[in-house]
Amino acid sequence: MSENKGILLYAEVTRDKYIHTVFFELAAKAFELSKKLENCEISALLITPPADMGLYKDGFKNSGIDKVYVFQDEKFKNYDTEIYSKIAVDLVNEIKPEIMLVGATAQGRDLAPRISSSLHTGLTADCTDLDINEKGRLAATRPTFGGQLMATILCKNFPQMATVRPKVFKPLAENVVRNTEIIYKTASDTITGMTSKVELIDFVKTIQNEINELDSAEIIIAGGRGIATEEGFNLLRQLAEKLGGTVAASRAVVDSGIASKDIQIGQTGKTVRPKLYIACGISGAIQHIVGMKDSEKIIAINVDENAPIFSVADLGIVADAYKILPEIINLCNS
Amino acid sequence: MKIVLCIKQVPDTSDIKWTEHNTIQREGVESIINPYDVYAVETALRIKKSCADVELTALSMGPLQAEDMLKKVVALGVDNGALITDKKFAGADTYATGKTLAAAIKTVVPDFDMIICGQFAIDGDTAQTGPSIANHLNLPQITFVKDIVECRDDSITVTRQADDGIETVKAKLPVLLCVLQGFEEPSRARINGIRRAQKTEIKKYSLADIGLNPEDVGLKGSPTYVSKAFRPVIEHKCEKIFACADTAELVHTKIKEYLAGADERK
């Protein structure tokens, strides 16, 4: 039997000084997994400059976390791959978790493979499901081959590591009150002696919200190849404005340059779960569907009655989006 | 300056066919260069154009048929190609792949200044191999690279895509870059490039050549393994309506209904 116990979560802090929402989604999943494991404590790793600690301290309450390991130093103002990885590796070697989960954000995707590689363990990227199998091991399921095949992956070594994209799991519906212990750790001399080999010179904010408007959007109007023109996207924007929604796009539209990568839904873009998703001129390649199928309600508009998008829709309209959208926009006016 | 490009041949995922046992049919599926690796090649070619004395070596781990892909990038202007090939490499996960490629780079171009990889491969789509190589070589890495700002003999400045915006970062060489899709039209091979590619020998390296043991590589050297693979099942009950005069009205009503329902559940 392995001596590794417990689940460690990486608590990413954003540039706007929030604990990233994906952390609470991971915490909820960890809480569910912990019930299937023996003596499973859930802990978090937080790396921050000392001045910001006050902002995060209360954030862990009610999230089901038993322990938060905090590493504070002035030099932790900017994320650094090698320094953060070394901190995580040292902590894993000390507390020996059986599972470590990291959000699949730009930072998480940069950091997690460094940690797993240093620890000579496996990392399953962008999981859409995590479970504990009959042998007590982490069964990590992820889409592969552009989402056309799902694979359940097991790891022979510890910790068993996985990354999960934002919005794939839901945060806890109810508060889980735990006596969360905050443990201040001192970074080793090795870490305090490390200097950043990659220097941040400039940053231009391009996404105004905390993360991305799509992450919190309750109504999404998405366009695909069938409406991939400036004129078509103007229609989507008009409808979005009427409904208080946000515009998104399929990969085909992003690749053609009509829409920016920030608003791409799907396997290589964002995963969303709004209250209402209106897919216009999207055929529904599985790559797209994995990113939006968990929306509460889906309306699909497509000229091709055999388009796969209809297989996930609640309401399917076989029509030309160019013709029907102006009519719907008009009705919203009246 | 010596730059190593790590490129991979992948099945064209837009053209997946299924066997009757619900597994992916590999025979007869066209292999293409991973689209993100095309941008790794482009990035390297641009550096070569703007700086003096740049030597590019493309390296790929894969079966013998990957030689064609290496010839193609040589035709585009890459100087050398090396194929890391051995049956024992089969079944490698990103950890074992990173370890193998790191050992291969140390063997083929021991005095490299830069390594450039594509950010993702469209088959596995893990984005982990680049960082894994960097870790095995104890190198700094810059992921999600959008553009090269400046390349000097001892440093490189690039822009990279973060979740909330664009960062400009500078690193001393050696460094590993993982590049995102660019927007420029990829280069096309010219006739003298194709001639040169025909004459260029793609060197082959086996497990023994790169100094690793059988237990370090392939399925044996991989901490992860696939326990099952299946096709995603998506179930939804769709009410399908063919457009007629009052369809827009129906959609409008349904939108209101769906949104009201969602509010009630709150």
Image (cartoon, grey):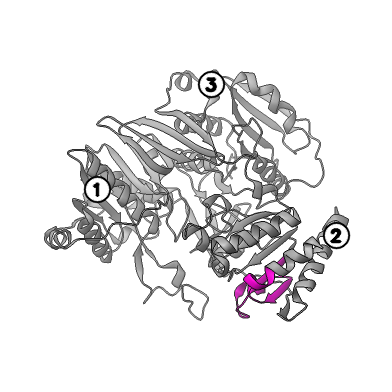
Circle nearer the viewer, 2 or 1 = 2
User: Quarter of the image containing the N terminus of chain B?
Assistant: top left
- Which residue is under mark 2? B260
- Which residue is under mark 3? A187
For disc 1, the neighbor class at 10 Å (few under 14, some 14 to 19, many from 20) is some
- Which residue is under mark 1? B210
Q: Nearer the viewer, residue A284 or A21?
A: A284
Instruction: Note whether B90 is above or below B127 in the view shown.
Output: below
Give coordinates of residue A191: x percent, y percent: 47, 22
Circle nearer the viewer, 2 or 3 = 2
Q: Outermost residue, right direction?
A: B264
Question: Could you tell me which residue is drawn at 39 percent across and 45 percent down?
Answer: B178
For disc 2, the neighbor class at 10 Å (few under 14, some 14 to 19, many from 20) is few
Instruction: Note whether B90 is above or below A261 in the view shown.
Output: below
What subunit carries mark 1? B
In the picture, residue B36 is in which quadrant? bottom left
Is residue A314 part of the magenta span, yes or no?
yes
Is residue B158 part of the magenta span, yes or no?
no
Q: At label 2, which amino acid type do we have?
A: Ala
Region of the chain picked out in magenta, as a range = A298-325
Q: What numbered label is drawn on residue A242? A: none
Distance from Cα at disc 2 to Cα at disc 3? 52 Å
Give coordinates of residue B59: x percent, y percent: 27, 52
